[in-house]
Image (cartoon, grey):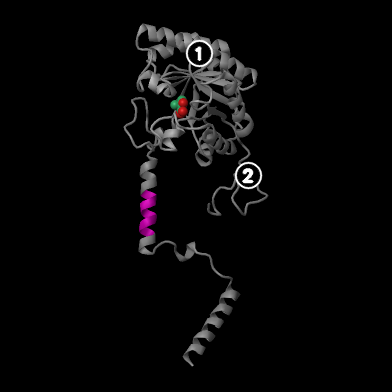
Amino acid sequence: MSITSFTGGQPLGDEGKPARPQNIRPKITSSTIHEKKQRHEPITCLTAYDYATSRLVDQAGIDMILVGDSLAQVVLGYDNTLPVTMDEMLHHTRAVRRAVRSAMVIADMPFGAYHEDEKEGVHNAVRFVKEAGAEAVKLEGGAQRVNLVRRVLDAEVPVMGHIGLTPQSLHKMGGYKVQGKDFSGIERLVKDAVALDRAGVFSIVLEGVPREVAAMITREISCPTIGIGAGPDCDGQVLVFHDILNLTFGEPAKFIRRYGDAAALITNAVQQFKADVESGSYPSDAESYHLPKETRAELDTILRRKEMKAYR
Ligand code: KIV
């Protein structure tokens, strides 16, 4: 890291100055999220996985930051979310925690962290709060997770549910498919949403669900729904950070809107750096450190004497 870069929120040489602007917005909690639903105010959520981007997302005023297990794909380069481990999720959640002041930080429970036994699920949820500073955890699944949700809540950890197209069920679903397209699917989704709501989750992600079904669930349950590929009638929306910035290297899904082209920005900057180094135009004299005047004069004298000796 360069000495002009972030150092835990404070550039080197600025010691003693406040680390952050003082006018930070109030802390977002699960109560804030609930109140937003009641006031019909749209809830915003983005994924983020590291210090710099989380800090920007937080400063831009997003309500919730999800350290999603999508990091398996967009950060670690796996084909799906299944391989990411608890240790990797904890590592990234800690980085996000260090950056974020106001947004609510939610950690995604990775595949295998709660599937084998509930006690282990509770243990892992607590680890996210205790070891990484998360304020809630997200877990995938509906009615079959109700006991686990209750036990995690008993351990004082708020829970975000996630139903519909649940990427951790990739193999069981037989691919990434929109869920709830027929009557039995719709019935299952509504039952799952109601069961999670009654169990006390503070919000539910609805992923890959027809707009009409998402709207019905949103009306039906008391906690906020956060949609991704679920239409505009949810209480809030979540997207993957890398998707909105063209950093995913593939055809975007139908519901993704690109808000920027970081791929083009990065490529252009890197190519310019390469060209400048190769042409000798970087670094310039102004981008170089210099000796103090007196030291330079002394050095010149020494060098001149050495040159003269060499001529003799
Ligand atoms: O991991 C993730 O990014 C998610 C969101 C898509 C909701 O679960």
In the rendered structure, which amino acid carries the disc numbered 2?
Answer: Ala
Q: Is residue 130 shown above or below 9?
A: above
- At which x and y percent is residue 108? 52, 27
At 47% from the left edge and 32% from the top edge, which residue is drawn?
Answer: 84
Residue 274 magenta-drawn? yes
Question: What predominant SS class does the magenta segment belong to?
Answer: helix
Whether residue 206 can be seen here? yes
At 42% from the left edge and 24% from the top edge, which residue is drawn?
Answer: 167
Report the label total.
2
Residue 259 magenta-drawn? no
Whether residue 216 can be seen here? no
- At which x and y percent is residue 255? 36, 25
Name the residue tied to disc 2.
19
Q: Nearer the viewer, residue 249 or 72?
A: 72
Q: Which residues are magenta?
A: 268-276
Residue reaching furthest bottom? Answer: 312
In the rendered structure, which amino acid carries the disc numbered 1?
Answer: Gln
- At which x and y percent is residue 192? 48, 11
Residue reaching furthest front? Answer: 116
**Which label is found at residue 194?**
none
Tell whether 133 sits left or right of 304: right
At 35% from the left edge and 58% from the top edge, which residue is drawn?
Answer: 275
- At which x and y percent is residue 36? 55, 19
Image quadrant of residue 170? top left
SS category of the residue bearing label 2: loop
Tell whether 201 sits left or right of 82: right
Q: Nearer the viewer, residue 231 or 40?
A: 231
Name the residue tied to disc 1.
144
Separation (CA) of disc 1 from disc 2: 45 Å
Residue reaching furthest right? Answer: 16
